[in-house]
Image (spheres, helix red, strand yellow):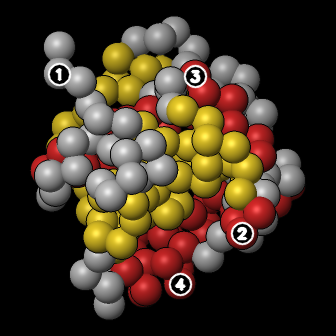
Amino acid sequence: MQRKIELKRGVDNTSVEAYLVDLVQRHVDDYVNYWVESLRLFSQSDKYWDWIFKLRYISNQENLEGYAIECENKTQGLMIIETQMHGSRLNIGKRLVYVDGIATAPTNRIEIQRPPQFKGVGQALLNFARIRSVELGYEGRIGLHSLPRSEGFYEKQNMLNCGSEEEYDNLVYFEYGVLRQR
């Protein structure tokens, strides 16, 4: 799968062509070789995520899908979604796509680099999760548990803050409801 998307260059807001693709080994290699050191140096909440394990795990699970965003020959974002086992908190009895992991490259994080290299990576991944939700018949519903430093990002995306959940290490649960077509 390859889907053309648009990112914005951080320095001047110009449009840049990028691609959302299936997660493969080279994306995990970029994470290990280019991301990990910066994530640890800047004490990012996802610094210990094991994308090597995640890639191996999703290859054996039909309900898990992995995606990456590539731009200028580098991995700019990563995401894993679960497609069959999660239900909506907003519409009880309805399924949703659950974002199991989502990350953007350190060079795209304003806590690490100002201005970021590219803007719109996280938003593009979330938008694609909504598209998958529609494709699966879930009407655009997606949910996720946010790392503490990312809560503001999800609020800016107009996801509904459903509060912290003790069974998920008190992480705040966010959800998009039905996608309304304009």
Amino acid on which disc 4 is placed: Phe
Q: Are marks 1 and 2 in contact (CB under 8 Å)?
A: no
Mark nearer the N terminus (4 vs 3): 4
In screen coordinates, is 27 left or right of 107? left
Q: Are marks 2 and 4 in contact (CB under 8 Å)?
A: no
Alpha carbon of mark 1 to alpha carbon of mark 2: how far? 34 Å
Q: Nearer the viewer, residue 86 or 105?
A: 86
Alpha carbon of mark 2 to alpha carbon of mark 4: how far? 23 Å
Mark nearer the N terminus (3 vs 1): 3
Q: Are marks 3 and 1 in contact (CB under 8 Å)?
A: no
Q: Residue at x 25, y 81 (%)?
A: 62
What is the x, y in percent for residue 75?
A: 45, 52
| Disc number placed over residue 167 in the picture, else none | 2
Mark nearer the N terminus (2 vs 4): 4
On the image, numbered disc 3 is attached to which residue? 156
Amino acid on which disc 3 is placed: Lys
| Disc number placed over residue 53 in the picture, else none | 4
Q: Which quadrant of the structure image shows residue 81?
A: bottom left
Alpha carbon of mark 2 to alpha carbon of mark 3: how far? 25 Å
What is the x, y in percent for residue 119?
A: 51, 26
On the image, numbered disc 1 is attached to which residue? 181
How many tags in the picture? 4
In screen coordinates, is 49 left or right of 5? right
Q: Secondary structure at mark 1?
A: loop
* Quadrant in which the N terminus appears: bottom left
Which of the two discs, 1 and 2, sits closer to the camera? 2
Q: Secondary structure at mark 3?
A: helix
Q: Residue at x 27, y 31 (%)?
A: 179
* Quadrant in which the C terminus appears: top left
